[in-house]
Image: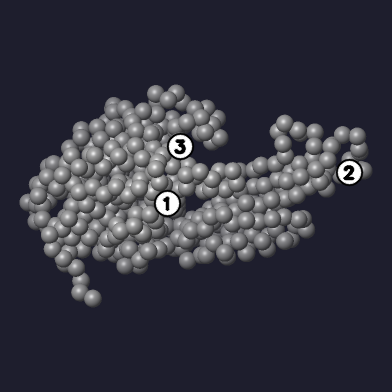
Amino acid sequence: MSQQQQAEVIKRIDRDELAALTKDLVDIPSPTGSEKALGEFILNWLTRHDIKSVRQEINPERLNAVGIIEGGANGVSLMINGHMDTSYTGTAEDAMFCRTLEPDDELKGVVRDGKVFGLGASNMKSGLAAFMIAGKAIRESRAALKGDLILAAVAGEISRTPIGPYQSEAYRGEGTGTIHLLTHGIQSDYAIVADRSGHSIVWAQNGVAQFKISAFGDPHAAWGVTREEKPPEASSAILKMIKVLQAIDGWAGEFERAHVYASPHGPLVPKVNIGSIQGGAPFRPNYYPGVCSIYVDVRTPPELRPVQVQRELKAVLAKLGIEYEIEMYASKMGYEAKTVGAVTQVLEDSYQSLFGKKTPTPTGVHASIWTDTNIYNEMGIPACKFGLGGGRWKFRSEQIDIEDIYQAAQVYACAALEICNWDKPQD
């Protein structure tokens, strides 16, 4: 990559265009399971800008939108990946998570004070805009590439898992789109996942295991008998669950301390979270509840298999002397990429060349989570994460600095110009 070629591409990356595209993306609702409208917009955008588009239909309401700038020789291919679904749905369902919901108008895209606001602005429609504009700039400059540059906007990355009555596509996240992408003809030699990282470079990510744990009681009317005749702790599944909660919370501290993963870019911190509890009938609280269930999310370090977490939980519960059931309903491994060093070096060199400083050190917030980076590494495609920052503005609405988007777009463009001009190694 010559400096002149790089300059020709960089000058075509415009802050106002990045802000406007991010706003346009924010203005198209795309909750998990309903990414079709946003995907169609992206496909049309790619076509308008002379980038080959590939429409991957997952089901009638979900698709992946892929752009390909084809290389002219036998060079290395690079894929830049970002998800279209948002952390919240933008509907009344969000009241399950938020005490108060801001007005719908505050979820729409707004550009002001050097920022873009709205639902999905930081996670991660600004990231989509950054690599879309980077690809457009490369295409417009007619920069020569030996290998393909693939721009992949995918469905279903947000952590939502089918369980119990929640079985529709609205609950199929955490890798759904990227798994479909990679198993339906879109492959590359390397990948950069543009999910949030605050411009740090991350190549080790936690896995996840999720469990439903149930305790059981004796469902009968609570009136008419004394506590001595029918002790509540023997009848109520909720009271039995208190013992389970205390035991799991105690184990959680031990697990989190024991399984910190020392990655080359800093520690990955595991996490145990009791995220939901269900028990009894709200319309019949005069009865002792016969079933109480909790739902536990465990973020696991690379190399720790979910079945090992299940064994540890069973050992904790076995000591309580109560009847219980445990079901693991999600299990995804974490990975540390072993052969992605050349890509991470290009990202670091590009960032330093552009901005005269090193990339930030990853924080636990950005490194100790699950992202689609793991899907690539599981399928043998060396991948790392380099994304934007930003964060919450209101309860659901987010904010992102336009300068943040602008810098990321430049890094994506420079990295693509370099990597896609490597010669394909001979087997």
Q: Quadrant of residue 320?
A: bottom right
Q: Where is residue 66 shown, x and y percent of the image?
A: 27, 49
Q: How many other residues sit within 10 Å of disc 1, few (<14), some (14-19) or many (≥20)?
A: many
Q: Earlier in the sequence, mark 1 or mark 2?
A: 1
Evaluate whether residue 31 shows in this view.
Answer: yes
Instruction: Please tell me which residue lies in front, 285 or 276.
Output: 285
Q: Where is residue 186 shown, x and y percent of the image?
A: 29, 57
Q: Where is residue 154 shown, x and y percent of the image?
A: 35, 48
Q: Residue at x 60, y 53 (%)?
A: 211
Q: How many other residues sit within 10 Å of disc 2, few (<14), some (14-19) or many (≥20)?
A: few
Circle nearer the viewer, 3 or 1 = 1
Q: Is residue 90 left or right of residue 222?
A: left
Q: Earlier in the sequence, mark 2 or mark 3?
A: 3
Q: Is residue 95 left or right of residue 188?
A: right
Do callouts 2 and 3 mark residues in contact (Cβ within 8 Å)? no
Q: CA distance from mark 1 to mark 2?
A: 49 Å
Query: Is the C terminus in the top left, top right, bottom left or bottom right quadrant?
Result: bottom left
Circle nearer the viewer, 1 or 2 = 1
According to the image, label 3 marks what residue?
A: 88
According to the image, label 1 marks what residue?
A: 176
Q: Residue at x 39, y 58 (%)?
A: 375
Q: Amino acid at mark 1?
A: Thr
According to the image, label 2 marks what residue?
A: 230
